[in-house]
């Protein structure tokens, strides 16, 4: 049974905190690459903070948060949260790759060899990163 004791609730809280960390890093990258507008970033930061607050609440109230009668195994619950965090990271890699392609296209349009080579390196690195995650 999942969430059957304080340690299991704390483990879930830790996984949720790690998801919030991944979301935070993804938002920062999106801001850096100008993929999102200010209001979108603010809304996403608010969602991240809400997730973090709920995880912190689980840490604080671990004893009260034990759930009886939940038939889902703890491993299944943690696996779902961890898979969500992995998806956040995979989506970030994909978006980064698309951004790199856009930078490459802009560099080609400008006709400047140095920026083209730099952008090409980023695209190759991005493809390698995505491929390493698929393999």
Image (cartoon, helix red, strand yellow):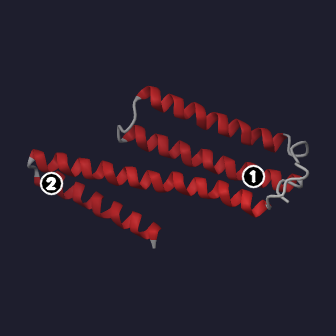
What residue sits 59% from the left and 53% below the top?
Answer: 84
Mark nearer the N terminus (2 vs 1): 1
13 over 130 or under it: above or below: above
121 over 67 or under it: above or below: below
The outermost residue toward the left is 111
Q: Secondary structure at mark 2?
A: helix
Crowding at label 2, few (<14), some or many (≥20) Cα neighbours within 10 Å? few
Rendering coords of residue 39 (x, y %): 45, 26
Q: Nearer the viewer, mark 2 or mark 1?
A: 1
Indicate the quadrant containing the C terminus: top left, top right, bottom left or bottom right. Answer: bottom left
The outermost residue toward the top is 39
Left or right of 66? Residue 44 is left
What residue sits 53% from the left and 34% below the top?
Answer: 44
Q: How many marks?
A: 2
Splitting the image into 4 quarters, where does residue 49 fall?
Answer: top right
- Is the C-beta separation of discs 2 and 1 under 8 Å? no
Q: Secondary structure at mark 1?
A: helix
Rendering coords of residue 118 (x, y %): 22, 56
Frontmost residue, 121 versus 97: 97
Crowding at label 1, few (<14), some or many (≥20) Cα neighbours within 10 Å? many
Give the CA separation, mark 2 to mark 1. Answer: 47 Å
Left or right of 75? Residue 89 is left
Q: Which residue is mark 2?
A: 114
Left or right of 107? Residue 42 is right
Frontmost residue, 61 versus 83: 83
What residue sits 10% from the left and 50% below the top?
Answer: 112
Residue 46: mark in rendering: none
Q: Which residue is mark 1?
A: 12
């Amino acid at each position: 049974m999942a969430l059957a004791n304080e340690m299991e609730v704390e483990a879930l809280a830790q996984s949720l905190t790690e998801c919030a960390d991944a979301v935070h890093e993804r938002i920062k990258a999106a801001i850096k690459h100008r993929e999102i507008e200010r209001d979108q970033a603010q809304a996403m930061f608010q969602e991240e903070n809400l997730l973090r607050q709920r995880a912190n609440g689980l840490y604080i109230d671990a004893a009260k948060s034990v759930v009886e009668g939940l038939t889902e195994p703890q491993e299944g619950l943690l696996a779902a949260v961890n898979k969500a965090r992995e998806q956040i990271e995979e989506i970030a890699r994909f978006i980064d790759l698309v951004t790199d392609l856009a930078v490459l296209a802009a560099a080609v349009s400008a006709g400047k060899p140095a920026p083209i080579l730099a952008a090409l390196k980023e695209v190759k690195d991005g493809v390698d990163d995505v491929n390493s995650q698929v393999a």
